[in-house]
Image (cartoon, grey):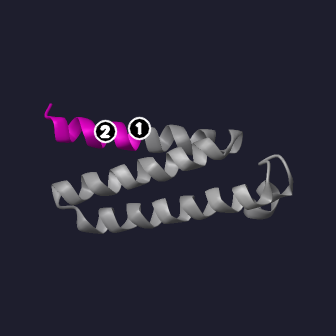
Amino acid sequence: MDWLLIFGSVSVAAMLAMYALEERGRAYVAGFAAACAASSVYALLVGAYPFAVVEAIWAAVALRRWSRRAAAGSPQEGAERKMYA
């Protein structure tokens, strides 16, 4: 395995883990955004440009969710219910 493949595998695995843990707090939402950005970089490096664009969009969506949670306060308050309602 080369380093690029390891980087891509770790990025996608981190995305999955952070997405599964998002309800536990804002740090996991930020982690998901960072993992999406890393996956986007990986896709650019391997030449998968459509995947890179989609992952960059996911990163932006996650950052927006992170900022909304920050504005709403604790994730246990009504913000989480409004987001997924």
Q: Which corner quadrant of the image does residue 82 belong to? A: bottom right
Mark on residue 9? 2
> Which residue is painted at 86% across and 51% down in the image?
77
* Label 1: element kind: helix
Image spot of residue 57 (x, y percent)? 44, 67
Mark 1 — residue? 13
> Which residue is painted at 46% across and 44% down in the image?
15
Image spot of residue 80 (x, y percent)? 77, 55
* Label 2: element kind: helix
Region rendered in magenta: 1-13
**Marks 2 and 1: CB-CB under 8 Å?**
yes
Residue ranking furthest to the top? 1
Image spot of residue 33 (x, y percent)? 49, 53
Query: Dot 1 surroundings within 10 Å: few (below 14), some, or many (20 or more)?
Result: some
User: Between residues 19 and 26, which one lies in front from this camera angle?
Assistant: 26
Residue ranking furthest to the right? 78
Specify the amino acid type for callout 1: Ala
